[in-house]
Amino acid sequence: MAKTNQVRGTREKVIATIEWILVLLLFLLVLFPFVMVAINSLKVKRDIIMNPFSIITARGLTFNNYVEAFVKMHFIRSFFNSLMVTGLATCLSILTSSMLAYYLVRYVNKFTAIVSAILIASMIIPFQALMIPLVSIYGAGLGVLNHRLTLVFMHTGFALAMSTFIYQGFIKSGIPLALEEAALIDGCSKYGIFFRVVFPLLGPTTATLVILNVLAFWNDYLLPSLVLSLKELLTLPLTTYTFYGTYSANYGVIMAALVLTVLPILILYFALQSKIIEGVVSGAVK
């Protein structure tokens, strides 16, 4: 019996070691592109082409790429444009989708059933199918292109269906109706019940949706390239493309621009990391 337990213990240790090695290899595989971008952002173009995988070259490392990228991409202006579009679109999408999800869950009738079906159906339509009608209608028809608010409303509209769907699932299983009835008996209005009772309980889901929407809005290139063309309105991903020429590209500056573009979103991710995990675990359990 003791020998059997010893064999079983040894086998579990071997399996745990193999699992740990596989996780470590996967982690290094995922991290490799980011490390290469960060290292090559500190090299001159010749060293990037000759020795892309070396950490330190004969010419050493330089921060001139970051200085050049910061100036040429008008980082402060582009950062403000990205921050404004991403911040407003995220707040609007969270507010509208949470209120819509609450209405669809608590007021079940034929109208809400049709709205729910339309929202789900809208998620299977690819964005590429809407590109040409979007530009022709809003551009030639209404003339509202080259406005940051146009981009905000479009981002909000495209994110509404998925955000509402996720909120619906959490409200159905995670918000007891008795809490709302108790608040109603205490004299709370319908808006008070939502903003003072329901919305605070949606915290983990809201944190998860915030980071998902911020990642999508901040890194989006296609939709801003269709809506914005004026230089003073360009977001960070659009200004990064200015370093690509017809016949050449300054790879060192491009790498530095990519790091500057990704850095704010990484800071936000690490700040909300615990909330994201809490939201995912909460959704998985329920």
Image: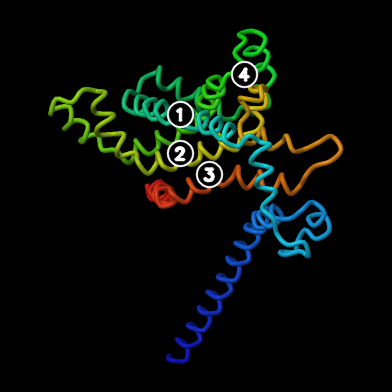
Q: Which mark is residue 209?
A: 2
Q: Mark 2, mark 4: which one is toward the viewer?
A: 4
Mark 1 neighbour density, 10 Å: few (under 14) some (14–19) many (20 or more): many
Q: Which mark is residue 159?
A: none
Residue 250: x and y in percent read 78, 44
Q: Which residue is mark 1?
A: 93
Q: Amino acid at mark 2?
A: Leu
Q: Which residue is nearer to you in this view: 46 or 265?
A: 46
Q: Mark 2, mark 3: which one is toward the viewer?
A: 3
**Distance in Å between CA atoms under marks 2 and 4:** 27 Å
Mark 2 neighbour density, 10 Å: few (under 14) some (14–19) many (20 or more): many
Q: Are marks 2 and 3 in contact (CB under 8 Å)?
A: no
Q: Residue furthest left?
A: 186
* Mark earlier in primary sequence (1, 4): 1
Q: Amino acid at mark 4?
A: Asn
Residue 83: x and y in percent read 51, 33
Q: Which residue is mark 3?
A: 265
The image quadrant of residue 246 is top right
* Mark earlier in primary sequence (2, 4): 4
Residue at 46 percent of width and 33 percent of height: 163
